[in-house]
């Protein structure tokens, strides 16, 4: 419960950006997700990926973009975890594409990306596993 409250307090500082172009979905290879309706976009993501239940959260960043300030219908939430114990992966980034329907908010798909410690691309997130 304390972790959930701490996460809620941290998330209160997130600034929602109402830029519809940022929300525009592109043709991507999204991982299929099980549909659960929630009251907010972030709760829909936390239902799918309960990061607040993890025992160790060394480096965690959460951003949320919505398509409108009042009555939004689409959101993109990105969760970045860094300072990982894995010697090949510096950070992981999961981008969740969320929409609102008559039942509430649900996740349409997830894009997984990795920031590698070694290899050709060590400064950017890539959509393939690290070497």
Image (cartoon, rainbow, N blue to C red):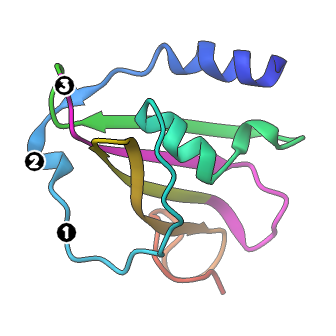
Contact, CB < 8 Å: mark 1 with mark 2? no
Query: In the image, is residue 7 part of the stretch drawn in magenta?
Result: no
Give how far apart the Cα atoms at labels 3 and 2 are: 17 Å
* Residue 106 position within the rendered picture, expressed as x and y whole percent measured from the top left: 41, 50
Contact, CB < 8 Å: mark 1 with mark 3? no
Pointer 1 residue: 26
Contact, CB < 8 Å: mark 3 with mark 2? no
Indicate left or right for 24 with 125 as reference: left
The magenta stretch is 71-91
Q: Which quadrant of the figure has residue 69?
A: top left
* Residue 28 position within the rendered picture, expressed as x and y whole percent measured from the top left: 29, 77
Please name the residue shown 81% across and 66% down the image. Answer: 86
Which numbered disc flags the more N-terminal residue, 1 or 2?
A: 2
Considering depth in this image, is 57 or 104 the residue closer to the camera?
104
Indicate left or right for 8 with 71 as reference: right
Considering depth in this image, is 114 or 70 the residue closer to the camera?
70
Could one spot residue 69 in this view of the protein? Answer: yes
* Residue 44 position within the rendered picture, expressed as x and y whole percent measured from the top left: 50, 43
Which label number is shown at residue 71? Answer: 3
Pointer 2 residue: 21
Closer to the eye: label 1 or 3 = 3
Closer to the eye: label 3 or 2 = 3
Considering depth in this image, is 5 or 101 the residue closer to the camera?
101
Indicate left or right for 105 with 112 as reference: left
Give how far apart the Cα atoms at labels 1 and 2 are: 11 Å
Above or below for 72 versus 1? below
Instruction: Categorize mark 1 by other alpha carbons within 10 Å: few (<14), some (14-19), many (20+).
Output: few
């Amino acid at each position: 419960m304390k972790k959930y409250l701490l996460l809620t307090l941290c998330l209160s500082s997130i600034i929602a950006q109402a830029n519809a172009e940022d929300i525009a979905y592109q043709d991507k290879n999204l991982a299929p997700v099980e549909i659960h309706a929630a009251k907010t976009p972030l709760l829909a993501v936390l239902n799918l990926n309960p990061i607040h239940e993890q025992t160790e959260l060394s480096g965690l960043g959460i951003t949320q973009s919505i398509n409108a300030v009042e009555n939004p219908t689409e959101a993109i939430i990105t969760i970045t975890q860094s300072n990982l114990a894995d010697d090949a992966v510096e950070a992981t980034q999961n981008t969740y594409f969320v929409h609102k329907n008559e039942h509430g908010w649900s996740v349409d798909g997830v894009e997984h990306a990795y920031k590698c410690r070694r290899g050709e691309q060590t400064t950017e997130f890539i959509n393939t596993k690290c070497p």
